[in-house]
Amino acid sequence: MTFSAPAGDNGPSRPLTGYRVIDFSQIVAGPMAAMVLADLGAEVIKVEPPSGDASRQLGSKPDRGYYGMFDTFNRNKKSVVIDLQTDAGHRHALALIDQADVMIESSRVGVMDRLKLGSEAVLERNPYLIYVSITAYGERGPNAQRGGVDVAIQAETGWMSITGEPDGPPTKLGAVPIDAATGHIAAQGALAALLARERGGRGEVVRVSLYDVGCHLHAHDFTDYLTMGWLAKRTGNFPAATTPSGVYQTADGTMVLSAYMPHHWRVALDILDDESLRNDPRFETMKDRVLNRDALLPALQAILKTRTTADWMSRFSAARITSGVVRNTGEAAESDQFAASEMVVDMSDGQRRVRSIRTPARYESFDVPSPIPSPALDADRSTVLADLVSVEPAPEPVE
């Protein structure tokens, strides 16, 4: 069976124009995956419980009454409340799934089966559905029945053990990188399955776990351990495998310098203009510099503190040596590069002002249109359910 998506009425068609996604997920990973598909043109219907997606109550300053997590990952979607615990809600959910190309869910293992919305049940009804299931630990192993959030997965996949200062405690990464990466990988899986279906296949079940993604994101550390038995450790702001590369204080701030490749090191020595570094045999080769990092790093730090960040950045950038200014979020958002990259998507409407970040990929043949703000809870009930009246049971005939 061959599928083709109809072109949109306005402007060039995006790849998923004409496809429908039913998003049963909450918080970050699943909503991120659905949002990526929405940006590519899919119609995304977000099915929420009566209490709404829990991220509607998540924000860094809840006392200010703004919960940015939901706005970040739920633009370009429609919202409908369906109570999956009720018979009518179950019928509505099945009717939506019958019309869908992709379904995304992020419940604990077994929950959707108990609701009779598991992959086996719905693929029997809609054999061309792409069923994307996101869980904490996958469906196998001793942790399969456990739930999990980003910080717990960071702990159990080794991330916290390699983050922080060597003599300090294990430290979590900022934000929710495993959740976000899981969303992108789930979207990638959905797109691959849709491509296979277009080529004459049928539906597919795509399973992605936060745990698998957490391991995958530092695969090189697992390669070292599985191959050589080497255990990755915390090294603070200085990577274990490359020297000099890391975070340094300047006369007025903080910067990153990475000049470990042989030709970069030779150029950096000219800029640093220090004969003791240039003539020290302990720093001659890449291997020497790694083995003698305890001597090199303080010497380099002392030199970098003699000039301002702007001065060093000007010198290193002109010489094409990798360097960077350590910025906070506000400084990054106000930078010239941020503006040039056109990162901001404005989702403001007549009632509130919301600005966020676009998804990273760019395409030459089409643009992602101006985003629709994240929906109010159940905002699209009438339009979403308008086509589903036929699923309601017919009234009993009057005797």
Image (tube, helix red, strand yellow):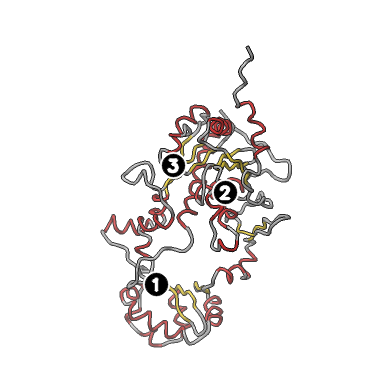
Marks 3 and 1, how far apart at CA: 35 Å
Disc 1 on helix, strand or loop?
A: loop
Give above or below for 175 relative to 77.
below
Marks 2 and 3, how far apart at CA: 17 Å
User: For mark 1, does the 10 Å Cα neighbourhood hold few (<14), some (14 to 19), or many (20 or more) residues?
Assistant: some
Looking at the image, tell me whether mark 3 or mark 1 is earlier in sequence order. 3
Q: Residue at x 36, y 85 (%)?
A: 279
Horizontal relation, residue 252 to residue 151: left or right: right
Q: Which residue is mark 3?
A: 207
Disc 2 on helix, strand or loop?
A: helix
Q: Residue at x 58, y 58 (%)?
A: 68
Q: Which residue is mark 1?
A: 238
Marks 2 and 1, how far apart at CA: 34 Å
Q: Residue furthest top?
A: 399
Residue type, numbered disc 3: Arg
Looking at the image, tell me whether mark 2 or mark 1 is earlier in sequence order. 2
Residue type, numbered disc 2: Val
Disc 3 on helix, strand or loop?
A: strand
Asked if the residue under mark 1 is in contact with the one under mark 2, i.e. CB atoms within 8 Å, the reply is no
Residue 129 x/y as whole percent: 53, 33
Q: Quadrant of residue 57?
A: bottom right
Give above or below for 82 relative to 264.
above
Q: Is any atom of residue 79 visible in this view?
A: yes
Residue 124 x/y as whole percent: 48, 27
Horizontal relation, residue 94 to residue 112: left or right: right
Residue type, numbered disc 1: Phe
Looking at the image, tell me whether mark 2 or mark 3 is earlier in sequence order. 2
Nearer mark to the viewer, of 3 and 1: 3
Q: Which residue is mark 2?
A: 36
